[in-house]
Amino acid sequence: MAINTDKNSYTIIFAIIMVVVVGSILAFASQGLKGDIDENKRIEKQQNILYALGINENDESSVTFVSKSKVAKLFSKNITEQLVIQGTDVTENNEAYLIDVKKQKALAKDPSYARKLPLFISESKSGTYYVIPILGKGLWDAIWGYIAVDKNMVIKGVFFDHKGETPGLGANINKRFFMDDFTGEHLNNASGKFTGVVVTKGNGDPRNNNKIDNKVDAIAGSTITGNGVTSMVKDELKLYIPYFKSLKNN
Amino acid sequence: MGLLSKKDAKLITDPLSDDNPITIQVLGICSALAITAELEASIVMAVSVMFVLGVGNVVISLMRNIIPSKIRIIVQLIVVATLVIIVDLVLKAFAYELSKTLSVFVGLIITNCIIMGRFEAFALANGPWRSFLDGIGNSLGYGLILILVGFFRELLGSGTLLGYKVLGDPIELTGLYAFGYENNGFMLLSPMALIIVGLIIWVQRSRNTSLIEDE
């Protein structure tokens, strides 16, 4: 049986069937796997927050999160308090880590909206640290991360990730050699004013021995991703400054 | 007789040398430029393309008699995009870590011209088994060049291979760096991939002069 595949009616019917079939396959796949995917994303958030605090299973050069089986326990043990800061209101919320930072950032374009800012506090014998989620733009797509600081705005640890930066260049922001440089770096300048950390090239300090210069060494060939990290750290942390000021006054 | 007849075996071996998709057919150059700054990314891309091209070729080949010729390119594109998205979703659900490494490549695979090129040139005119072999052969040829380029770019650009510091540490000044060796930052930029591909084409054509086109 030969079908005349050149007929217009055949072409249209074929296109319709194809769209319906492919559409339903994709819809089924997406709906059927949604539960698993969302769960993975939730676990990843907890892993990222713990990573920024320095709780991970890294060996010498790898980036290894705590395992899935341990993450829930470690998260509730180490994150002693989860806050949501909205304007001047500070409320406790045990699901603050599920707040969609991207959505909040979009809503905040409307100046009358006070953005919900999640903050995770880890209180232990070794000190009190504050983990702040950050979100910004790289070269191609979104970059985000978590940054753990103490109350004097000295970085305890960071975690960065990206959606689609160039492999081998900007994508390296989630590698140890880049993230580790931030540890110990001061976010305030010498006179105690918040300035952030600048990702810069040619500061002659590739090992980042100088922790008070507000600078870390950039990745060669990925200037725009690096600038994205700089402004992401600065713009997002800036929003939390009033909260840190109120800490000092108490 | 072995598993493959001589004719079928040629489908695998030809793209590795005299009919290489990158150096001879000049397909898939864009991804060869984009992701070869690191050897690991090259390998991941090569494996992903092998999967998509192998399966995609079979699907298109099975559909070859019912696809209306007027919209065949669109149909091909839909098949690739669907395959890639399903793989991406399954990985996200069951191998989340792996899916994060691959997410960057999803878009690059869909638009990879090798895939469209082989659908159009081979799968539309051949049976599923031969199309499968053609897909595997071409993606092997593609992967071979990707890995070669990735090898040189990572070695000369960052002094590492698969992330291991094979030439010593540029900051601690050990290994080669102790003698004043410097990494070549140019290697990390895309144009160098094109130059390396050019060098490979040059070597290949000087070894096999029958590949040189007549003036």
Image (cartoon, rainbow, N blue to C red):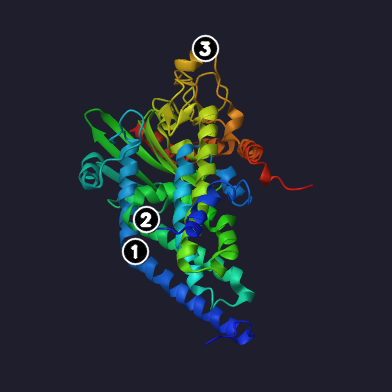
Residue A15 in picture, x, y percent from top left: 55, 78
In this view, the mark in front (3 or 1): 3
Identify whether A200 is placed above or below B172: below
Residue B171 in picture, x, y percent from top left: 47, 19
Residue drawn 33% across the image and 28% down it:
A60
Q: Secondary structure at mark 1?
A: helix
Q: Amino acid under label 3?
A: Phe
Q: How crowded is the residue under tag 1: few (<14 C-alpha within 10 Å), some, or many (20+)?
A: some
Residue drawn 73% across the image and 48% down it:
B213
Residue A11 vs residue A218, the one in the foreground: A11
- Return the residue at label 3: B179
Circles 1 and 2: CB atoms closer than 8 Å:
yes
Q: Chain of mark 3?
A: B
Q: Chain of mark 2?
A: B
Residue drawn 52% across the image and 87% down it:
A1
Q: In the rendered structure, which disc, 2 or 3, sits on the residue that comes first in sequence?
A: 2
Question: Is residue B112 visible in the rendered structure shown here?
Answer: no
Question: Is residue B80 visible in the rendered structure shown here?
Answer: yes
Residue B48 in picture, x, y percent from top left: 45, 52
Q: How crowded is the residue under tag 2: few (<14 C-alpha within 10 Å), some, or many (20+)?
A: many
Numbered-mark total: 3
| Image quadrant assignment for residue B124 | bottom right
Q: Is residue A30 left or right of residue B74?
A: left
Residue drawn 51% across the image and 59% down it:
B7
Q: Which image quarter is the C terminus of chain A in? A: top left
- Return the residue at label 2: B92
Q: Secondary structure at mark 3?
A: helix
- Return the residue at label 1: A33
